[in-house]
């Protein structure tokens, strides 16, 4: 196989990186990045740039592994030892239940709010689950791939257009805050807690690095084409750089439209998104309602669709190595996990809606604190003797990896310090 990057090869390879972008551009972008701009203006641009830079190697390694070996990085975990797979499975099992429930609630509630549907949240979640599961079961990976390419393209265009509009709104008022406005403090307990939450899932938790390697295998089955290393990494670069750029645009949305207005912004994702839409219509007129509403809905639905596909895949793949390949190609197990997560999402929303934010915060903290562990595991996988030497990362990527691990460990220590003291 040629090791050159060709346009034809890139087109055949393009897919897993787009799905990653669809999964990542969700709560971390729409809610956290926009809130960062709303509360601190453009002050936190450096945070988004740095965290995307320092997490970059560990997401890249998942794509590097599958391109070089033709296998998912979970097999690389298994080569390190069963402990790595079990650790990954345990964390994924817990976060899958909490994350899918929270995303289902936010997505369905946003749709109901924007379309004026006044029914209990559990019913909107049931409708979303039926719709999402139907897409995944009927269309499988090919339909998911096509839908995500369309949605991410629309999301990118509408976000850029909306941010440009927001810029001109801010320019008309001279980028001035309302008289007497005092911005919140960044380096106190509350500010640092927000900073850690912003970085924890920006662009996504590191364990999500497994997802593109599984999607890459499905893409190969779909196209009957096995990309070389350069083609696979090019697909990843497009998706990853796209998520980082979109994070900056969402921060711009908050900074240009919401910063300095004097309004108190909710920590609740649904209420915050409603405030974002309201501020747009108030500043520019009712006609912009449909543009910003499209951004909000496509952002969350693309995340819901990819997350509900990815978690069953990772849980099924992990079990195949924990139980010695018994479930390696078991499509039935994927369906079981998909239905299980759909049912648990409905039950959690029905029984624990008021406590869902606490559960989500806990899941975010666990993912953040475990980030250095999975960063190190991913690094070990692609620098081990079992991994082809010609495909191992260059020295600059290794240095960036160690800088990233030190950065993540440092902020974990900072978080613990603020929690204890």
Image: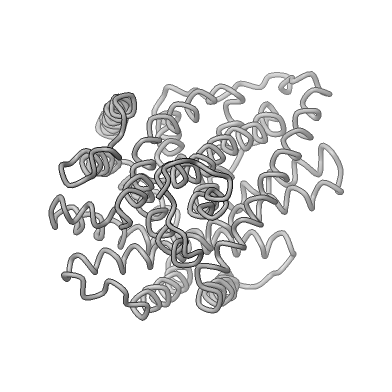
The image quarter containing residue 195 is top left
The count of marks equals: 0
Can residue 411 be seen here?
no
* Rendered view: 405 above or below 378: above
Along the line of sight, the residue nearer the viewer: 335 or 214: 214
Can residue 9 be seen here?
yes
Q: Which quadrant, please, contains the C terminus?
A: top left
Task: Name the residue rendered at 53%, 63% in the picture.
Answer: 305
Along the line of sight, the residue nearer the viewer: 180 or 284: 284
Residue 52, position as x, y percentages in the image: 45, 33
Task: Name the residue rendered at 45%, 73% in the picture.
Answer: 342
Residue 290, position as x, y percentages in the image: 79, 53
Q: What's the image's color scheme?
A: one colour
Along the line of sight, the residue nearer the viewer: 369 or 419: 369
Residue 224, position as x, y percentages in the image: 47, 65
Residue 352, position as x, y percentages in the image: 43, 66
Task: Name the residue rendered at 66%, 44% in the picture.
Answer: 156
Horizontally, residue 328 falls left or right of residue 199, namely left
Task: Name the residue rendered at 38%, 68% in the picture.
Answer: 312
Most extreme residue toward the front, as rendered?
2
């Amino acid at each position: 196989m040629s090791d050159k990057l060709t346009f034809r090869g890139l087109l055949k390879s393009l897919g897993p990186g787009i799905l990653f972008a669809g999964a990542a551009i969700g709560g971390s972008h729409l809610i956290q990045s926009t809130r960062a701009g709303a509360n601190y203006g453009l002050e936190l641009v450096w945070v988004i740039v740095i965290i995307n830079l320092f997490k970059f190697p560990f997401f890249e390694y998942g794509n590097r592994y599958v391109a070089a070996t033709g296998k998912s990085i979970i097999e690389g975990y298994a080569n390190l030892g069963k402990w790595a797979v079990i650790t990954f499975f345990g964390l994924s099992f817990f976060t899958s239940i909490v994350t899918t429930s929270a995303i289902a609630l936010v997505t369905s509630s946003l749709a109901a709010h924007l379309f004026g549907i006044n029914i209990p949240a559990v019913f909107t979640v049931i409708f979303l689950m039926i719709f999402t599961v139907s897409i995944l079961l009927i269309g499988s990976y090919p339909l998911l791939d096509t839908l995500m390419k369309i949605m991410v393209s629309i999301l990118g265009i509408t976000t850029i257009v909306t941010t440009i509009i927001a810029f001109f709104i801010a320019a008309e008022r001279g980028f001035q805050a309302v008289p007497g406005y005092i911005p919140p403090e960044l380096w106190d307990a509350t500010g640092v807690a927000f900073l850690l939450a912003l970085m924890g899932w920006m662009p996504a938790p590191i364990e999500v690095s497994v997802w593109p390697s599984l999607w890459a295998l499905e893409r190969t089955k779909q196209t009957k084409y096995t990309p070389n290393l350069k083609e696979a990494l090019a697909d990843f670069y497009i998706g990853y750089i796209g998520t980082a750029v979109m994070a900056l645009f969402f921060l711009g949305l908050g900074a240009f439209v919401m910063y300095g207005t004097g309004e108190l912004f909710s920590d609740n994702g649904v209420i915050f998104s409603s405030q974002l839409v309201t501020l747009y219509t108030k500043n520019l007129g009712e006609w912009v309602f449909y543009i910003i509403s499209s951004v909000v809905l496509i952002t969350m639905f693309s995340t819901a669709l990819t997350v509900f596909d990815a978690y069953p895949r990772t849980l099924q793949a992990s079990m195949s190595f924990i139980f010695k390949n018994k479930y390696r190609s078991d499509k039935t197990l994927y369906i079981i996990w998909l239905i299980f997560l759909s049912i648990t999402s409905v039950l959690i929303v029905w029984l624990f809606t008021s406590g869902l934010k606490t559960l989500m915060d806990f899941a975010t903290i666990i993912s953040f604190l475990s980030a250095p562990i999975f960063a190190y595991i991913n690094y070990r996988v692609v620098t081990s003797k079992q991994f082809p030497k010609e495909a191992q990362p260059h020295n600059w990527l290794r240095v960036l990896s160690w800088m990233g691990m030190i950065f993540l460990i440092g902020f974990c220590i900072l978080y613990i310090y603020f929690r204890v003291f």
